[in-house]
Image (cartoon, helix red, strand yellow):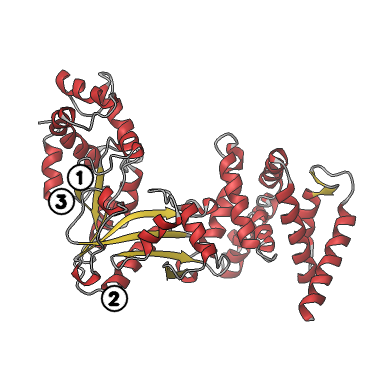
Amino acid sequence: MRSSFLQGLFQSIAKRGRRMLQRQPAFGIDGVDMPALSQAILSGRGEASGTALASTLLEDWKRLDQSGRLSFFQHLASNFGPDHERIAASLAAYQAEPDDAQAMALHEAAEPRRQELFRRLNRAPRGTLQLVAMRAELLGLLREHRELASVDRDFEHLLASWFNRGFLVLDRIDWNTPASILERIIQYEAVHAIRSWEDLRRRIEPADRRCYAFFHPALVDDPLIFVEVALTQGIPAAIAPILAAERSPLAAEHADTAVFYSISNCQAGLRGISFGNFLIKQVVEDLKRDLPYLKTFVTLSPAPTLRKWLSGHANEDQGEVVLSDAERSALARLDAPDWHLGEDADALKPVLMPLVAWYFLHARRGDGTPVDPVARFHLGNGARLEQIDWLGDVSERGLGEAAGFMVNYLYDLRHIEENHELYANQRQVVASSAVNRLGRRANA
């Protein structure tokens, strides 16, 4: 009965708010002026009325077309930033009397008004989920509308706080997990597509398979990120045996290696909020506790930008590595269909292996970090570049993105912090001796 009363109260307040705001809108829907509604949310004192107005704005925003959503974001960028006059006054007060109280006043003055608006919108039922969806829409507009970057910075600042590690819950995904969550695992898998319910079952039910996901209390039935794990004997060099429909499962107690072969972020609106580093490290700890006979923790990772980089080196005017005409000719053969079958593969392997090692060890972006995005992720987590896998993924996607190559990154808990420091401070790629030897051959 109490729930029914509160729902009726919210609806009544929201209707009154709509009537107040139906006056020649700058933009909106059904006659509601969304800029005025945003201002009303910030100006309101009552929690109940503020929550009702926040619900109204979020519902109306979902019904806006793309042009209306762009206008809303542009209005936030132009009119809901910091109050510069207030900042100047607070700065003068702090300079005159530099104490903690004046410092706090200056801090509060410098905060963009958008941040408080987002906090109040977050009070609405399922407000967090709707704000994550709103940011996903914003990210799609940023490339062509850089004036919205300040809005995105405020979104990212708040979401990083709301989704910090202290709020995340790690759950194992198995065949007893609710079907609604399993459907999302199928939907969100971004590395190796799950093609059916039976395919999903093969990945989570056998004794030598695991899947773990992070959840947040505000998105209880929607994972943030998940990792799929295979228990094996030794470090695998190819994905096909792991994904094979017909295989004999390994008894968990006979495995010595845990392989993280797929990591998928689920919420586009949380891009830039890091979960993967916490996820892998916690899964390693959980596996070590549950399966103490596991000795090795590695990934079997794709290399999504490798093929593009190799194509640049097939062109005589590009590339950091000096190649002979014969080597360039060999690279050009990657364009042939089914090059990975038969003699072409035998001829290409001694050319490509050193060049690919060089790519992972030395190819850099303008900021000094590796070109490969998966390498940036794992090296930043403190992993070691352990092994380069020839024809590790001969699927259409694997050949198109990475010329069939895959990579193993090793997570050794004894050296994770040391490796992370070397990467973060010196941009050093920590690699095995075998990979380093291959890389030295590239320009030999």
What residue type is disc 2 on? Asp
- The circle on residue 282 is none
Tell me the mark number nearer the camera, choosing from 2 and 3. Answer: 2
* SS for callout 3: loop
Q: Residue at x 81, y 42 (%)?
A: 26
Q: Which of the two marks, 3 or 1, is nearer to us in this view?
A: 1
Residue found 75% across the figure and 66% down from its top: 51
Q: Could you tell me residue 200's position as x and y percent? A: 41, 58
The span from disc 3 to disc 1 (Cα, nearest Å) is 10 Å
Which callout, 1 or 2, points at the residue further toward the start of the chain?
2
> Does 38 appear above or below 145?
below
- Report the residue at 29% width, 60% height from top: 230
In this rendering, would 428 be left or right of 31?
left
**Mark number, residue 290:** 2
Task: Name the side, left or right, on which 399 lies relative to 178.
Answer: left
- Give residue 432's mark: 3
**Element assignment for label 1:** strand
- Residue 171 seen in render: yes
The disc labelled 3 sits on which kind of residue?
Ser
Q: Name the spot of residue 225 as percent of width and height, x first.
A: 45, 59
Q: Would residue 165 be found to the left or right of residue 297 on screen?
A: right
The residue shown at (69%, 55%) is 86
Q: In the rendered image, which quarter is residue 316 located in?
A: top left
Q: Alpha carbon of mark 2 to alpha carbon of mark 3: how far?
A: 28 Å
On the image, the x and y values in percent for residue 325 come to: 16, 18
| Residue placed under numbered mark 1 in the picture | 388
Q: Quadrant of residue 9?
A: bottom right
Q: Nearer the viewer, residue 157 or 302?
A: 302
Q: Quadrant of the C terminus?
A: top left
Quadrant of image for the N terminus: bottom right
